[in-house]
Image (cartoon, rainbow, N blue to C red):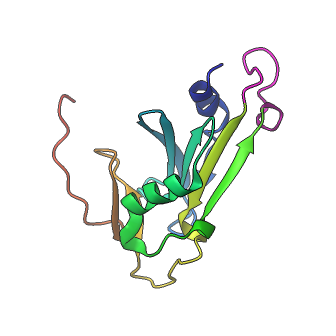
């Protein structure tokens, strides 16, 4: 099983929204070149976590990626980025179909970041359900405008 299939099959578990509401989150994948990036977001679009998967992950490059998407919400420090290795045995992926592929991941959790503000009108990162773009808005998620979807 290739890495992308492994991630899609074993690391796409549903979770709860943290910091915005109590709804369940869905995992939405954004592929950028050789990187596989996943966003865990609730129906309102609030991004609880962003995860980058690969053979190796560069925490500094991932931090820059987060800053490019969420820089308006405040400082993103090296301490806000975590790196982990997911092995087949902790994924339940051993045996036929799972193989022995390990997955490296770097992740950023919006609600747990060291620089998070408790201000009720704070800015937060959202994922648009229409166009799939990441955008910064007030915690209510209003304010993203995008071009109408084409070909749908």
Residue 139 seen in the current view: no
The residue segment tinted magenta is 88-101
Image location of residue 150, percent across then percent down: 17, 34
Residue 64 screen position, x and y as percent: 45, 58
110 shown above or below 89: below
Say above or below: 112 vs 11.
Answer: below
Rendered residue at 67%/33% (across/down): 10
Q: Main secondary structure of the magenta part?
A: loop
The residue sitting at 56% across, 49% down in the picture is 51
Is residue 115 shown left or right of residue 99? left
Q: From what the image shows, is residue 115 above or below residue 16?
A: below
Query: Is residue 56 or residue 124 the one in the foreground?
Result: 56
Image quadrant holding the N terminus, namely top right
Rendering quarter of residue 23: bottom right
Q: Quadrant of residue 152?
A: top left
Work out which residue is located at the far bottom of the displayed protein and give it: 119
Residue at screen point 41% across, 33% down = 33
In the image: residue 137, left or right of residue 26: left
Q: Is residue 59 visible in the rendered structure shown here? A: yes
Residue 79 occupies quadrant: bottom right
């Amino acid at each position: 099983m290739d890495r992308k299939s492994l991630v899609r099959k074993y690391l796409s578990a549903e979770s709860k929204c943290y910091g915005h509401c109590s709804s369940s989150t869905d995992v939405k994948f954004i592929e950028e070149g050789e990187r596989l990036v996943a966003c865990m977001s609730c129906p309102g679009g609030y991004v609880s976590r962003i995860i980058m998967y690969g053979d190796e992950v560069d925490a500094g490059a991932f931090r820059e990626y987060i800053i490019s998407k969420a820089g308006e919400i405040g400082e993103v420090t090296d301490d806000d980025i975590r790196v982990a290795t997911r092995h087949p045995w902790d994924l339940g992926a051993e045996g036929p179909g799972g193989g022995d592929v390990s997955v490296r991941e770097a992740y950023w959790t919006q609600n747990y970041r060291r620089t998070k503000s408790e201000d009720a009108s704070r800015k937060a990162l959202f994922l648009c359900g229409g166009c799939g773009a990441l955008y910064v808005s007030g915690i209510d998620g209003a304010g993203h405008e995008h071009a109408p979807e084409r070909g749908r």
